[in-house]
Image (cartoon, rainbow, N blue to C red):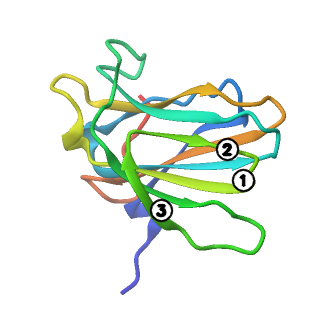
Amino acid sequence: MYLNFSENVKFTLCYQGAANAVACDVINMELYNHGAFVVVHTGANDTDLTLSLYEASSVAPSNTAAITTAVPIYIDIDAGTTSDVVSATTAAYSYAINPAGENGLILIFEIDPTILSAGKNCVYLADSGGNSGNYCTILFLGEPKEKGAALPAAIS
């Protein structure tokens, strides 16, 4: 069966830049059945970058809180060299990237909007640590409730 990704999956660039001041866009999950943050981290400067899931009541963001419900996490700790295998790791709501042993990493946080608290329909990744010599890209991939040629905005 053929699946037209452009009409069935929303792709949103949430952050791209240095891995020490990650400012991830906030995603409004109201119009999405499911989503995932896909993080690509490169660089071997050994300062761990911890990414944690947060919820908010708007994309501003306002009324924020850490998510404490574990979500499925998948990882390829040797991405871009000899590996393209993404494997499940322990479900959690945060992950510490260790560039010394995970240089060239793909990290995926699965998001089910039912884990969000009442009145908080938005989600994002917050950071701590990291190194300005390393690089980080965060994408959101979402399955919208309404599919078609014009998918709903995720960051407004």
Crowd rating for badge 3 (residues with CA inside 10 Å; few <14, some 14–19, many 20+): few
Asked if the residue at tag 1 contacts the one at tag 2, i.e. Cβ–Cβ closer than 8 Å, the answer is yes
* Callout in the foreground (3, 2): 2
**Label ID, residue 6:** 3
**Label ID, residue 101:** 1
What's the residue type where badge 1 is placed?
Answer: Gly
What's the residue type where badge 2 is placed?
Answer: Asn
Write down the quadrant of residue 130 in the picture. Answer: top right
Picture quarter with the N terminus? bottom left
Q: What x and y, as percent, mark residue 89?
A: 45, 59
Residue drawn at x 66%, y 55% as measured from the top left? 105
The residue nearer to you, when weighing 117 against 32, is 117
Residue drawn at x 27%, y 38% as measured from the top left? 69
Q: What x and y, as percent, mark residue 125?
A: 48, 33
Q: Position of 38 compared to 104: left or right?
A: left
Q: Which residue is mark 2?
A: 98
